[in-house]
Amino acid sequence: MIELQGLTKRFGEFTAVNRVTFSVRAGEILALLGPNGAGKTTTVRMLGAILRPTAGDALVAGHWVTKSPREVRRRIGLLTEHPGLYLRMRGAEYLDFFGRMMQIDPDERVRRARELVDYFGMSDLYDRRLSTYSKGARQKIALVRAMLHDPPVLLLDEPTSAMDPHSAKLVRDAIVSLRSQSRATVICTHNLAEAEAIADRIAIIRRGEIIALGTSGELKDQLLGPPLMELRLAGPVDGAVDLVSDLVTIEGRGADWLLYSTPNPSHTNPAVLQTLSREGVGVVTLSEVERSLEDVFLRVVEA
Amino acid sequence: MTTKALQREGGIAESLRLVLALVGREVRDSLRDWRIAIPIVLLTLLFPLIMTFVANSAIEWVASYGGAPIISERMLPFLLMIVGFFPISFSLVIALETFAGERERKSLEPLLATILSDAELYVGKTVGAMVPPLLAAYLGVGVYLTGLYYFEGWSPPLELFVLIIVLTTAECVVMVSGAVVVSSQTTSVRAANLLASFIIIPMALLAQGEALVMFWGNYDALWWIVAFLVVADVILVRMGIYIFNREELLGREIDELNLGYIWRTFWRHLQWEPWFFGRDPDRLPAALRWMGALGGLYRRHLPAVLRESRLAVATVVVAILLAVLVGLSFAADYPLPAELLGDEVVSADSFSDSRVLGVLSLTTGGILSHNLRVLVGAALLAVFSFGSLAIALTMAPLAVVAFLVAQSANMGYDPWLFFAAGVLPHGALEIPAVVLSTAMAVRLGAVFMSPPRGMAVGEAWLRALADFLKVFVFLVLPMLAAAAAVEAHLTPALVIRAFGG
């Protein structure tokens, strides 16, 4: 549904996005994760045929952004960080205007607008001026605007970054509820929890380049190494180290605890327990040390 | 796609629908803003009524002193113009708000993500900014004329009425299209308001000039002002269409002045590749590497710059031909007395006075410095006039030359001999040098209207400046120096030989 091929954008001497290549399948949500100024917004703007790539190209819903920008824009829904509403308009009027801008038939645009507003629980706001909307409601009406023409590609540029936790959750829930088998979604964020909660895959972007791409689990394995296990013993750890050092890689130790890593815990852990039990070493707990996406992100970004 | 609309065909009908929808929104939004709506209503209804009252009172007051009908004859059309002008001044406020304001409030980006093309967006927003003030102006004119007809039985001649409507409309287009250009260079309404002085001050001066013309009663002069405004409209709209696009709007933070970037960009465009008959110039002996630089400049770089400037060169050549025709035409219409160029006038003494009109010293240095001053001045004027004043400055002396050559025929001389002896020796170098310099100066001004695709206006101007400097220093200056030497030493001798007594 979305395929980037060496997408590059330069502003004068500054390279904002450098040879970015990845793809997003229909039904998939990909999070573009990166610090401020990493090139997320520029990438999304190129995918939305709003900015023209300096080099490379992207195929979006069957159309190349460099060759058919209008056709690409027909097929994308873009939600920006700031909802950018016309505050003197009413909700219904605003949606009708953007429906006209996307050339939706009059009856169809009223039906779609009503349907989406009802879906997001905003029916009571429909005829009110946008200036009276709360922050969360403003972003949700912007999401309705982006979804009005039922686009096969949804581009969400830091949709919750300027919001309080409650409003952010409302918008996040709305995004998750829009997941569809026929729609590809790219969400830009620097919110790690949001990326992990929403996205199927995560692409980490730094200084305009994709430096890691995969599912949350794949990224952890790829960048933090194999899973880390913590073993707590009933007695001193000295003898146990010799017993398990052939099975696992010892990463650290204390008086009665041991840290080890293993690429295949489901196979190794039973063997470790069996060996210790056989030698009469008492095991209190064996657990996986939790590794967060934040560790991955910091490892990559600070590298 | 599931919606029927997305399967529709594009084309002109779609463009028209999009533009009209945008215009409708912009107009509604402007009229919902009380800061715009209330003054427009006042200027539409109240102000014309006051003007009617003022006109009526002035006529009665003048009549009470025995009457001077010319005052009412002049004042009524003048107030008609003012009644039309005041409401359209709001177009500037609306345009700044709709372009810079939207950008500042971040409401432009959702619009940029729709299927609107850059041109549709520009046209929709421009027309949207013009409709309320123009309607207010037309309505105000209607109210004023109705009042005058009712109280004084006065109605304007059809030509004056059409002139005022056209003038008002052209001024409105200038203000709105100027505001688009200004707004495109800023990211805030505050900065746009500051830059708007470049529109307000010329428009205020123009309005004062129009007022003078109105009291003078020469309405033909106002048609010339309309023609000037239409040219300005075309230039500004052309510029607006070019710079009001997604790349320019989202691509840069243009309020920041980055001197380092400016210098690096200028320096990059100032440089060229060395060349030495296909050999690697770096392998030349160190003492001869300058030959590689010169080879690259004269064999490759300057021809490329001139090829790129061929449209500007052609424009200047056409302008010069027009200037020659104007000079010839004036010579036919205004022949000089035959004794003015008698044999006794052309003698060694004619050239012994080293100063002409107290300005030009007829020495190599004097002629060269004069030509340099004029051409540099023309380049500076070109920057502020989209190149037009540079062309005008070049046309003037050549029209004079053509005028003098034609006059020589009127006085019984062979004009070809006159031209061959008095103009050609130094003109063969000087005129091409002037053409090249003026063409490069035209680029310095015209680049604002149409910078090369994919290049920001600022970078395009820096490139034009670098090209101007290279052509000026390495082509124009040597040609002018040689021409000045010929003009100081050879031309006088040839003229004396050909025509001296």
Image: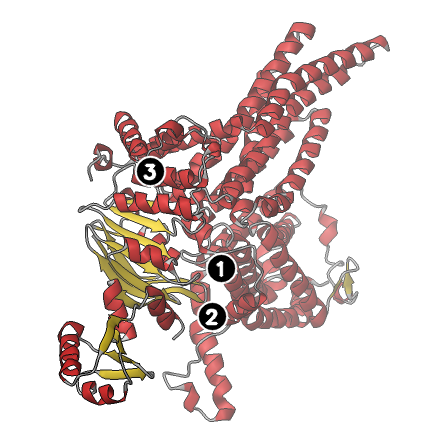
- Could one spot residue A66 in this view of the protein? no
Q: Which amino acid, mark 3?
A: Val
Left or right side of B57 for A301: left
Mark 1 vs mark 2: give the one in front. Answer: 1
Indicate the secondary structure of the residue bearing disc 1: helix
Quarter residue B92 falls in: top right
Q: On the image, numbered disc 1 is attached to which residue? A: B460
Image location of residue B116, percent across then percent down: 35, 40
Q: Which amino acid, mark 2?
A: Leu
Q: On the image, numbered disc 2 is attached to which residue? A: B302
Q: Please state the chain letter of the residue tagged with numbered disc 3 in the rendered image.
A: A
Image location of residue B18, percent across then percent down: 35, 33
- Could one spot residue B302 in this view of the protein? yes
Residue A144 numbered tag: 3
Residue sitting nearer the eye, B91 or B100: B100
Q: Which amino acid, mark 1?
A: Ala
Residue sitting nearer the eye, B402 or B199: B199
Left or right side of B458 for A219: left
